[in-house]
């Protein structure tokens, strides 16, 4: 029997995620508070904490959602085309990424981003291996690509 996801949970998470992304277009991550996120999303603090531990947990959710959309959008393209598309999307949303990552350097947030890319690159190991012939195990190659991509964003 498949467990159904409650539509209210989906709507609440989407509202909180959208609020976080909207706030990131205007201010650095370090200055965003849970109260501001809740006010923008029209969600209570208790509902926020029902779904997320803190704003970092919400940031992970947002980054996973954004990166899933980015990678799904270019999945059928070559790795080179995927990287070009990802970089172009980041350029188009540079204010968001700047506020998320650069205003006050946050090592925890950078690690979250790196791990998100690492998961995506693990899924793409075969394609990456065909283009970039690393003499290393796939785990090292994926780690190298994720760290390089994160560094390039910075």
Image (cartoon, rainbow, N blue to C red):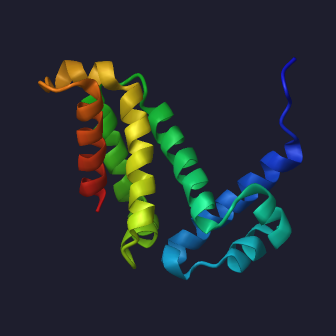
Above or below: residue 4 compared with residue 84: above
Could you say where residue 7 lies in the image, as x and y percent from the top left? 86, 42
| Residue 44 appears in view | no
Instruction: Name the foreground residue: 119 vs 19.
Output: 119
Q: Is residue 139 left or right of residue 71?
A: left
Could you say where residue 44 lies in the image, as x and y percent from the top left? 84, 70
Q: Is residue 17 left or right of residue 125?
A: right
| Residue 37 appears in view | yes
Q: Is residue 112 left or right of residue 44?
A: left
Instruction: Name the foreground residue: 98 vs 119.
Output: 119
Query: In terms of image quadrants, where is residue 80?
Result: top left
Q: Is residue 111 left or right of residue 17?
A: left
**Residue for point 45% across, 35% down:** 71
**Residue for point 38% across, 63% down:** 94
**Residue for point 22% across, 24% down:** 137
Instruction: Name the foreground residue: 102 vs 105.
Output: 105
Could you say where residue 84 lies in the image, as x and y percent from the top left? 28, 41
Above or below: residue 104 compared with residue 77: below
The N terminus, quarter of image: top right
Give the number of marks: 0
Query: In terms of image quadrants, where is residue 127?
Result: top left
Above or below: residue 87 compared with residue 4: below
**Residue for point 31% across, 53% down:** 150
The C terminus, quarter of image: bottom left
Could you say where residue 51 lies in the image, as x and y percent from the top left? 76, 56
């Amino acid at each position: 029997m498949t467990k159904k996801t409650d539509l209210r949970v989906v709507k609440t998470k989407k509202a909180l995620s959208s609020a976080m992304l909207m706030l990131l277009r205007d201010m650095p991550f370090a200055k965003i508070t849970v109260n501001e996120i809740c006010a923008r999303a029209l969600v209570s603090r208790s509902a926020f904490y029902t779904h997320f531990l803190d704003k970092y947990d919400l940031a992970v959710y947002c980054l996973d959602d954004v990166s899933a959309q980015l990678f799904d959008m270019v999945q059928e393209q070559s790795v080179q085309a995927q990287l070009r598309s990802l970089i172009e999307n980041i350029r188009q949303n540079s204010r968001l990424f700047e506020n998320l990552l650069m205003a006050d350097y946050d090592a925890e947030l950078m690690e979250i981003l790196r791990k998100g890319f690492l998961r995506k690159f693990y899924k793409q190991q075969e394609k990456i291996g065909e283009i970039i012939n690393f003499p290393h195990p796939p785990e090292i190659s994926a780690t190298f690509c994720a760290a390089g991509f994160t560094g390039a964003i910075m």
